[in-house]
Amino acid sequence: MSKTKIPYAEESWSPTSGCSFGCPYCWSRAIAHRFGKSFAPTFHAERLADPLHWRRPRRVLVCFNGDLFDPQITNAQIAAVWGVMAACPAHTFLVLTKRAERMSAWFDWVAVEHSGGASVVVRNEASRRVRWSGYSQLSWPLPNVWLGVSVTNQADADERIPHLLRCPAAVRWVSAEPLLGPLDLTHGYTLPPEECVCVPDEKQPWLAGLDWVAAGFQSGPRAPESKPLTAARSLRDQCSVAGVYFAWKNPTGFPPLDGVVHNAMPKVDQ
């Protein structure tokens, strides 16, 4: 557990860390390498139970310096993380991934492997166990888990958002940070009825299935001087027309975009 300066969350929780995706602008990888630490995807069983001890409700970034759905994290390990989130309904957990296809496939795995209520057990370094056996009793989505995908450009959106829209989530969100170029979220999609968890079986814009977009430019010493302001304004306007919450942010707050602070996000009922 650690405090975070990300303006839309209060805590970060990293039961996994590291990522094998290899983004050239990854700040977390750069920090790890600066201090001589490995950035290989790792499951940390000793951190798994941390949220169970928090009394005050809070918004929590999950695996902020890694990716929960990295291929090197097993389905059972992901299930253990999910079990802790389910056992902590007072907290709101924000999950963000670049591995949207793996996330969608994980829900398929859960439906098959835990249809009979099999429990998930992970032993931590103190030899304590975290067990949760309620998958067969779950009514998806979990009301306190928000699922998001990280995108930087249209190619990312085209690949990841359709998988996100297949996943059951109380809130579906897109993190467009760093925003590197134009991003059109009005693209349409069609899903068969058994897979379409958010809209009827007809062509709809992606924004019809999204609840929140958080965006910002690349920051830090390697950030380019030129900023795609036209892309930022377009994204803001798309969300405004669709009635989707929009936040324009940097690593520490909500700076104005064209003189207006945009810090809207879905409400949390506690």
Image (cartoon, rainbow, N blue to C red):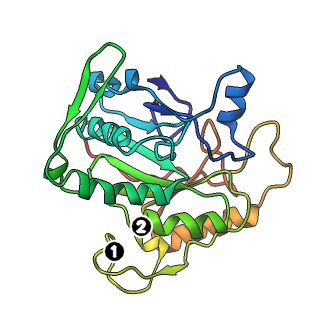
Check contact, mark 1 vs mark 2: CB within 8 A.
Answer: yes
Residue sitting nearer the eye, 4 or 256:
4
Badge 1: few (under 14), some or many (20 or more) residues near its Cα, within 10 Å? some
In the rendered view of the protein, which quadrant contains the C terminus? Answer: top left
Q: Is residue 116 above or below residue 90?
A: below
At 32% from the left and 13% from the top, the residue drawn is 126
Residue sitting nearer the eye, 268 or 194:
194
Image coordinates of residue 230 in percent, x first then y, are 74, 67
Q: Which residue is mark 2?
A: 165
Amino acid type of disc 1? Cys
Q: Furthest-top residue in view?
A: 126
The image quadrant of residue 65 is top right
Q: Which residue is mark 1?
A: 196
At 43% from the left and 55% from the top, the residue drawn is 103
Q: Furthest-bottom residue in view?
A: 202
Q: Is residue 122 above or below residue 261?
A: above
The image quadrant of residue 90 is top left
Image coordinates of residue 51 in percent, x first then y, are 32, 27
In the rendered view of the protein, which quadrant contains the N terminus? Answer: top left
| 119 relative to 217 in the view: left or right | left
The image quadrant of residue 157 is bottom right
Q: Which mark is residue 92?
A: none
Amino acid type of disc 2? Leu
Q: Furthest-right residue in view?
A: 225
Image coordinates of residue 44 in percent, x first then y, are 44, 26
| 101 relative to 90 in the view: left or right | right
Q: CA distance from mark 1 to mark 2?
A: 7 Å
Residue sitting nearer the eye, 38 or 15:
38
